[in-house]
Image (spheres, coloured by chain):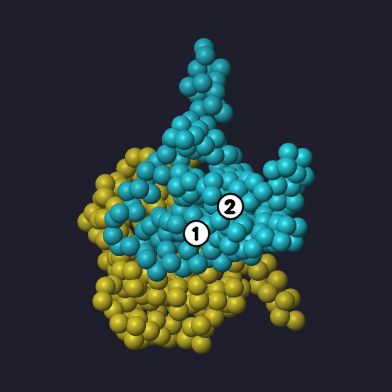
Chain colours: A cyan, B yellow
Amino acid sequence: MYLKKSRGYLLSKKIDQFFLDLYDALQFVLRFFKEVFRPPYEIREVIRQCFQVGYRSLFLISLTGFITGIVFTKQSRPSLSEFGAQSWLPSLVAIAIIRALAPLVTALIASGKVGSNIGAELGSMKVTEQIDAMEVSAVNPFKFLVVSRILATTFMLPVLMSYMGFVAMLGAFLNVHSNEQTTFVLFFQNAFDKISFLDIFSSLIKSFVYGFTIGAVACYKGFHAKNGTEGVGKAANAAVVLSMFLIFVEEILIVQIANSFR
Amino acid sequence: MIHIRDLYKSFGDNEVLQGIDLDVFEKENVVVLGRSGSGKSVLIKIICGLLKPDSGTVQVLGQEVDKLNDRDLRELRLKVGFSFQNSALYDSMSVRENLAFPLVRNVRNLSRKEVNRQIESMLNDVGLSQTIDQMPSELSGGQRKRIGIARTLILRPQIMLYDEPTSGLDPITSIEINNLINHVRHKFSTTSIIITHDLTCAKSTGDRLAMLFEGKFISQGTFDEVFTSDDERIQDFYKYNFIQNDLERASSHKQHH
């Protein structure tokens, strides 16, 4: 009776589909780890993708990093002044940028800029049968398209995050310098006074994880696009939305783990 | 070369192939004719291992396709070329890169000079050597089809599978593609399956026809044998095809003026 009512689904159509999709996604990630160590290695394609990932996000990351540094410093000054703790401004800004803002903002920008691009690119290749064409010409499309892109996002996110951290600190310095006439060396000495190895290490780990997430989600969504051009749009959109959601979940988890070591 | 027995394939409730039997012999051109949605493309996608059958056997060059592991399937695919309906050219790559892509990944230790030589020779064969540095977006529909065929042929397959080679082309370009299919057969000694709904293409390229209707072959034989049949479904298809061809010709004539 129940089976008849639910047309043969185990729980309901939507719940069954959710678990099937989850299983599919897991298989996809496992296949990445299987293929990544198996020759032939598409090194030229990985380098090309690294350049694409870095180049595509560089302008936006420079701009956002610089503005974040200035605005955060500007907004924090009045509160610190109230307690006469203005001299702590460089340390506060450095902690905020290195521990949280740089990895998170870089990941969100990369997810919008790179994730949507990968989702749309692979999605359009899927619906125009270019991925099938690779497969029938005895080329492993997973290795060429997916592995190279996931590796590129995983390795480029920490680089972009470090660059963004530097640009944001530069923005913060300019703001502090224009108000307090501090020197470049003194500002950075103060700023890094309160930064520990764990702060830098956990941020690097975070950006590796975010990079992997952005690449894996975008490739998965693109690789499974269907229903023509509409499907391509959906793949690009889902790549951004899902990777952003997962980034926030990962942020909470990694912060919890890092705090347990402090 | 290809032996298919009792092949079934369905997608959900839609039973696309319902017990297909087909034999294709060496250096033979077999045309699978049928209306859109009759399961023609599904059939050749199963032959090259892009889709798995629900039941039945597909033997290509002595190997059962759905029982091959990844490595053996890749080996087999070097011998089976697939020309896609929409050409499926890699649109981020130039014509040269499109042709080089399967070649450099499957034939080891080729010098750059040798790769270029093979690409140029293949483009000469399809009559498009002038497009070598163009992007796919700069090519016409007919040119894309030819480049798609050239990309497939560069691995020198023994079997060619053509999915709707003339669809979306004007009658003159369609004839050029039909001639190219015949040229490929003679120059490269290929065995081919041509999937089409175009009777002109079927008549000029096929040694033998197999008429697919609602997932089953309803007739097999030469063009004349199939179309002298009294079967109403075949006669309807014949009549409809000529009406459609006349309409296409009229529309093409209008565009030229």
Looking at the image, residue B193 sits to the left or right of residue A230; the answer is: left
Pinpoint the chain carrying mark 1.
A
**x and y percentages locating residue A179 in the rendered image:** 75, 58
Q: Which residue is mark 1?
A: A159
Pinpoint the chain carrying mark 2.
A
**x and y percentages locating residue B39 in the rendered image:** 47, 49
Q: Which residue is mark 2?
A: A191
Q: Is residue A30 visible?
A: yes
Q: Depth check: give the residue in front, A14 or A159.
A: A159
At label 1, counting other C-alpha atoms closer than 10 Å, the crowd grade (few under 14, some 14-19, many 20 or more) is some
Picture residue at 51% right of the left edge, 83% below the top: B133
Looking at the image, residue B168 sits to the left or right of residue B129; the answer is: right
Dot placed on the residue nearer the N-terminal end, 2 or 1: 1
- Residue flagged by tag 2: what amino acid is it? Ala
Dot 2: element: helix
Looking at the image, residue B220 sits to the left or right of residue A156; the answer is: left
Q: Depth check: give the residue in front, A69 or B39.
A: A69
How many circles with numbers are drawn on the protein? 2
Q: Against A162, is B145 above or below?
A: below
